[in-house]
Amino acid sequence: MLLEQDVDKRLLEVIQQRILGKTSWMGVKTLKNPMDFWVYQELIYESRPDYIVEIGNRFGGSTLALAHLCDLLGHGQVIGVDISHKDMHEKAKQHPRVTLIEGDACAKFAKVRSLIPINANVLVIEDSSHTFENTLNVVRLYSSLIPEHGYLIVEDSICHHGLDVGPSPGPYEAIEAFVTENTDFVIDRDKESFVITWNPKGFLKRLSL
C-alpha cells in the first residue's frame, strides 16, 4: 500500500478543490472525499450501527447521506453535533433519522450520551476543528461509545500529511497520541484501500472493552 507521502500532492490539491468547490449529495454541499465515503458505506452496511454520531456537519450533505444510508438499511439514527447549524440545509435538518445538537462536542458529550441506549452499536465520525488538542479531547471522550470491533473515524488527518492545510499539529498527531495512550484501539489501514484518503491513520478500530 502507498503511504500518504507517496501520492503526488498536485493530484491531492486537485481533488481538494473539487471537494471544496463542487461536491454535493442530492444537491446539498458535502465536504467529503467520495472515496472515503464509499468506505463508510461499506462499514455501515457491515456493522449496521444503531447510531452514527457525526461531529462537524457544516452544510449537512454528509449528514443527509448518512441518514439516507440508514434509510436503505431500514435501521439507524444520525446524531449531528456542531457549534452551529445555521449553514445546514433544510433537507438534512428535517430528515426524520437526524437529531441535531448545537455546541462544543466535548461540552455536549453528556447530552449525546443521554440519547444513546447502553450497549448500542455506535459509529463516531470526528470532523470538527482539526486542532490537535480538540481532536484528542473529542476522541478520548467519544471513544467510550464505541463497541468491541466498532470504529471511530477521525477525518482530515491529511492536514500536513499530504496537503499543506489546516492546523499543525492536527488530527494526524492526535490520532498517534490517542493510540499510544489507549491500547484498546488500533489504526486500521486496510480501510485506506483506495490509497487516496483524507483520513490517513484515521480509521480507529476498537479491539476490546
Image (tube, rainbow, N blue to C red):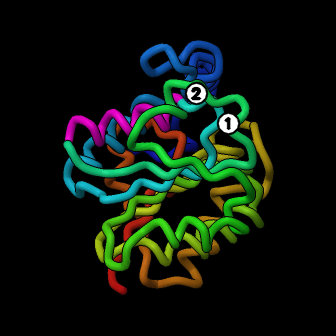
Residue ID for mark 1:
163
Q: Nearer the viewer, residue 200 or 62?
A: 62
Does the stretch in magenta take in 63?
yes
**Residue 141 on image: x %, y %:** 60, 74
Q: Which numbered circle lies on residue 44? A: none
Query: The residue tagged with tag 2: helix, strand or loop?
Result: helix
**Mark 2 surroundings within 10 Å by alpha-carbon count, few (fewer than 14), some (14 through 19), many (20 or more):** some
Answer with left or right where residue 45 lies relative to residue 201. Answer: left
Circles 1 and 2, Cβ within 8 Å, touching? The answer is: yes
Q: Amino acid at mark 2?
A: Leu
**Residue 20 on image: x %, y %:** 64, 22
How many dots with numbers?
A: 2
**Mark 1 surroundings within 10 Å by alpha-carbon count, few (fewer than 14), some (14 through 19), many (20 or more):** some
User: How far apart, in angstroms, are the residues tagged by discs 1 and 2?
Assistant: 7 Å
Q: Nearer the viewer, residue 44 or 4?
A: 44
**Residue 61 on image: x %, y %:** 51, 28
Q: Which numbered circle lies on residue 12? A: 2
What main secondary structure does the magenta stretch of the protein show?
A: helix
Q: Amino acid at mark 1?
A: Leu
**Residue 80 on image: x %, y %:** 55, 48
Answer with left or right where residue 115 lies relative to residue 42. Answer: right
What residue sits 28% from the left and 49% below the top?
44
Quarter of the image for the C terminus: give it: bottom left
Q: Is residue 96 above or below residue 18?
A: below
Dividing the picture into quarters, in which one does residue 95 lie?
Answer: top left
Dividing the picture into quarters, in which one does residue 136 lie?
Answer: bottom right
Answer with left or right where residue 29 lies relative to residue 71. Answer: right
Q: Is residue 96 above or below residue 51?
A: above
Does the stretch in magenta take in 168?
no
Give the magenta part as a residue range. 61-73
Q: Nearer the viewer, residue 73 or 125?
A: 73
Please report whichever mark, 1 or 2, sits nearer to the chain's N-terminal start: 2
